[in-house]
Image (cartoon, helix red, strand yellow):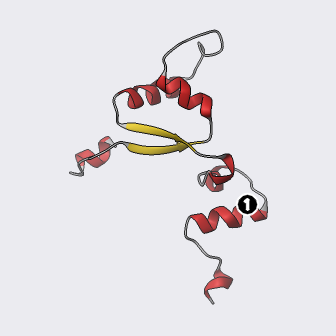
């Protein structure tokens, strides 16, 4: 985000990030701390600050529709093909 600003790209609205963890979204909106959240990683606090500053907006996304999983998790073939399609990609066989 800051890199884009240095390159001359002005941000006109929040950067939307899809998240499949509703607890993360709730904790980012409400800075209420309790026993279960007191040892949260520094990355979470950075994200919460971005949400509070209006730079990032978190939106819930069902785990089955989390496109980032194709890059980060081993998936069953059917799920891989579905997420690949959501990215707008095709297999080499489909092109020929």
Counting from the top left corner in percent of width and height, residue 81 is at 70, 67
Q: Residue at x 70, y 50 (%)?
A: 73
Task: Please identify the quarter of the rendering in which residue 82 is found.
Answer: bottom right
Instruction: Tell which residue pokes out farthest to the top in this image.
Output: 35
Depicted 85 relative to depicted 96: above or below? above
Residue linked to disc 1 = 79
Depicted 2 relative to depicted 88: above or below? above
Counting from the top left corner in percent of width and height, residue 14 is at 35, 42
Task: Please identify the quarter of the rendering in which residue 91 is found.
Answer: bottom right
Choose between 29 and 90: the one closer to the eye: 29
Instruction: Tell which residue pokes out farthest to the right in this image.
Output: 76
Q: Residue at x 64, y 56 (%)?
A: 70
Counting from the top left corner in percent of width and height, residue 64 is at 69, 52
Q: Does residue 16 appear to the left or right of 38 in the view shown?
A: left
Quadrant where the C terminus lies? bottom right
Local crowd size for mark 1, using a 10 Å CA cut-off: few (<14), some (14–19), many (≥20): some
Counting from the top left corner in percent of width and height, residue 52 is at 38, 26
Q: Which residue is drawn at 55% across and 12% down?
A: 33
Q: Which residue is drawn at 79% across and 59% down?
A: 76
Q: What element carries label 1?
A: helix
């Amino acid at each position: 985000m800051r890199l884009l600003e240095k390159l001359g790209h002005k941000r006109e609205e929040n950067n939307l990030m899809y998240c499949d963890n509703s607890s993360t979204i709730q904790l980012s909106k409400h800075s209420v701390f309790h026993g279960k959240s007191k040892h949260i990683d520094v990355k979470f606090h950075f994200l919460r600050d971005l949400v509070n500053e209006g730079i990032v907006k978190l939106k819930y996304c069902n785990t089955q529709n989390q496109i980032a999983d194709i890059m980060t998790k081993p998936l069953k073939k059917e799920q891989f093909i579905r997420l690949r399609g959501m990215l707008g990609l095709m297999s080499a066989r489909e092109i020929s």
